[in-house]
Image: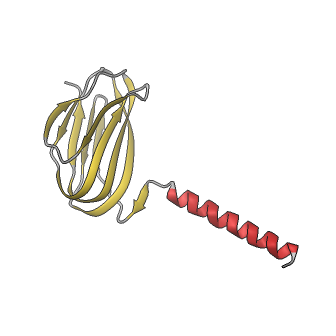
Amino acid sequence: MSAKLMDGILIFSLMLGALSLIYACGKTINGPQIDPKIISETNSFSFQTDELSNVTQVLEFSEKFTGDLVDVVQDCEVTEGDATIIITDARQKELYRSHLHSHGRFMAQKGMPGQWRIVVAIENCSGRLDFQIMQP
């Protein structure tokens, strides 16, 4: 093979690898995307979906909390797969992690006020998601 052809193959391979990496780093892994209903105010965050069918997606939100404690109210109906919520405070300390199969009102650990990160990790999930995060 000529050097010119080898260079072309190398460049094509690198471009293909870069496109694959960009695609893999996206928030949606496979399946349909969801568009949850979000209500966001200082010290309060609400997340609600319609019926899901085999959804895999990671959603991230940044919300302002002025206090150091929050309650999480979970009222989900997960029929297949899994969905997890993770809350971290302004210092990226994990305050709360729970599978959304659980129902009820739960208190997160104390954290530093400021911008908190809320991650909803959905994997092959069917059902309905509904939770609220609020200061007590």
Of all residues, the one furthest to the front in this rendering is 1
User: Picture coordinates of residue 50 (x, y %)?
Assistant: 22, 58
Q: Which colour assignment does the render follow? A: secondary structure
Residue drawn 53% across and 60% down?
Answer: 23
Position of the C terminus, as image quadrant, is top left
Position of 65 relative to 8 (above/below): above
Please provide percent x and percent y for residue 26: 48, 55
Look at 38% across and 51% down and name the residue there: 58
Residue drawn at (26%, 23%), measured in percent from left and top?
Answer: 69
In the image, farthest residue toward the bottom: 1
Q: Is residue 109 left or right of residue 103?
A: right
Question: Which residue is farthest left?
Answer: 104
In the rendered image, residue 75, in percent from the top left (x then y), is placed at 15, 45
Report how many numbered discs are placed on residues in the image: 0
Query: Which quadrant of the figure has residue 98?
Result: top left
Vertical placement of residue 13 versus 67, above or below:
below
Residue 124's x, y, as percent?
30, 60
